[in-house]
Image (cartoon, rainbow, N blue to C red):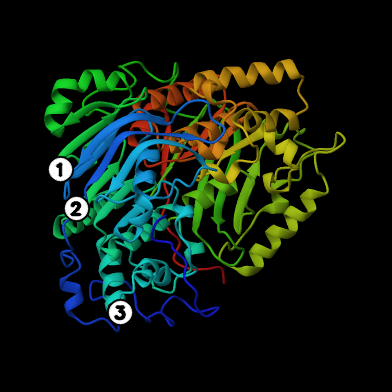
Amino acid sequence: MTRVTRVARGEGSGPLGAVPDARAEPSGPADVAPAAAARATAPAAAARGAELRAEGWGWRHAGRSEWAVRGLDLAIEPGERVLLLGASGAGKSTLVHAFAGVLGGSDEGEQEGSLTVGGRLPAESRGRTGLVLQDPDSQVALARIGDDIAFGCENLGIPREEIWHRVGEAMTAVGLDLPLDRPTSALSGGQKQRVALAGVLAMRPEVVLLDEPTANLDPAGVSEVRDAVAAVVRASNATFVVIEHRVDVWLDVVDRVIVLDPGGGVLADGDPATVLRERGAELARGGVWVPGFDPLEGRPARQAHPSTTDARPTLLATTDLAVGRTPATVAARGLDLEVARASALALTGPNGAGKSTLALTIAGLLEPVGGILRALPTLTGDPASDAPSSSETAVAEPGTRRVARRHRRAVRRARRWGGVGGRPLGEHPFAWPSRELLTRIGTVFQDPEHQFVAGTVRGELEVALKALRLEATEIDARVAEVAGRLRLDGLLTANPYTLSGGEKRRLSVASVLVARPAVLVLDEPTFGQDSRTWAELVRLLGEQLDRGTAVVAVTHDRAFIDALADRELEVRPADGTLS
């Protein structure tokens, strides 16, 4: 991210010493003059934005035979507001990264043609350009919210008092009502995205580049961020380019649409209303999310879409479950739910409510901090009489530390069963050996890169299959099937970290699907997808449901919920810690 240009400073301090003891409320930090609040929605105007120009430009990632972008000619005038569209893998992220000057040198890839920002090379314009990336974790650099947002301003040499004015304004603008000294490690993905955006807005750059800035935000957050960006860009006259598959979110903000052709060059360019009216059907067929076009083309994603789970065996069940990243801190509590075979449960709710923490707990990757999480014999394969009984793990008074300790002791006892050598597996997923977990509960993390462990796409798809000790022919067959379905077959030799955001997401889903687990736990499975890859992914998950697989999905994607979900659980944040 271009704002994270490190400078030397004393160890252990923030960029500006002590963070003001205040919350990001409309009045701004405690040491900020009252006038700062009035500027929160209309920041001081900067110089007019810079021109962006590409002439015959192309980029090929190191180790890749295909060019990510090639033969691109375009000019974006100073102050223009552009929505950059195109199918997944068309090179949209590559282009904005190039304008931001963060693609890297010759060791990272091969470049042809020319690219300029305000008539200069992008690397010479980094102080004038702000970029927000798809991945929230890749752009939060410091330990505290206030420090991280202030960091870019500090590197620009802005006076300390002015920096805190800007930090307060930016936090208010993006709806980030948290203490300035809140650890960034404690934030959800959506909250981190707001921190990153606030850091860019505080810099007041001449060029604002956003790569799917709302991908991890709840619906309220999408509106807040869109409105904040629109106010800042209009007031500052900055040149603005946003990549976003949700076209309708930004139509009132932008004055131009540019559609990249996956084969190279520009497919469409012009006034948004005109482009969508005259080329809408063509663009929809190519994967662009055009308002009014149904990517599923009226066909249901599932053969069977039951309205009740009564007739289907339960695989996992919770009673008064409390979840948290640490035993002493609760993200959400009082959760009662069942995961039944062939059912799809959608977990919704605001950013920071604990949805991802709940998903990781259901998946057996985090230990419950209270209540009961049980895997039934229908999932474990244990004879009912051999599994540790639920009475051993039943937790009364879920709001006490004593209860949390009782639960952890019960899990430690369950570890003795282990599921090894023919012994019963037990009902605690957190205690299962990893190989047993692999075929029972498959997990897709919110950040795809968190689960990449191989150097190629093929290697990533083979990890689970090799752990299961499958025959080579079976491994090849499964890899070919899922790679073809999710449009990864042309990328099998590519490094996973060089993929686009949408391709990374499809790879993370595919790497779990190949193991064919009984339960799929998916955290934002559809972000970064164009309409074609979204439809293919949804249909593939629908087929898994029809075969009896259970799906638990953290999602803000209403179309995904409507297409697949039987039930929806709205998760609300807990209001305290275990005591």
Q: Which mark is residue 159?
A: 3
Residue labelled with disc 2: 230
Q: Nearer the viewer, residue 511 or 177?
A: 511
Please report the residue visible at 15 percent of the width from the left and 72 percent of the height from the top: 38
Looking at the image, which is closer to me, 104 or 461? 104
Amino acid under disc 1: Asp
Alpha-carbon distance for marks 1 and 2? 9 Å
Residue 71 at what x, y percent from top left?
34, 28
* Residue 252: mark in rendering: 1
Type of amino acid at the residue the image marks with label 3:
Pro
Closer mark to the observer between disc 1 and disc 3: 3
| Residue 208 image point, x, y percent | 27, 52
Q: Amino acid at mark 2?
A: Ala
- Crowding around mark 3 (Cα neighbors within 10 Å: few <14, some 14 to 19, many 20+) is few
Mark 1: secondary structure: loop
Q: Earlier in the sequence, mark 1 or mark 3?
A: 3
Label 2 CA crowd tier, 10 Å (few <14, some 14–19, many 20+): some
State the residue at coordinates (69%, 64%): 405
Of the image marks 1 and 2, the number of the one nearer the N terminus: 2
Query: Which quarter of the figure is the C terminus placed in?
Result: bottom right
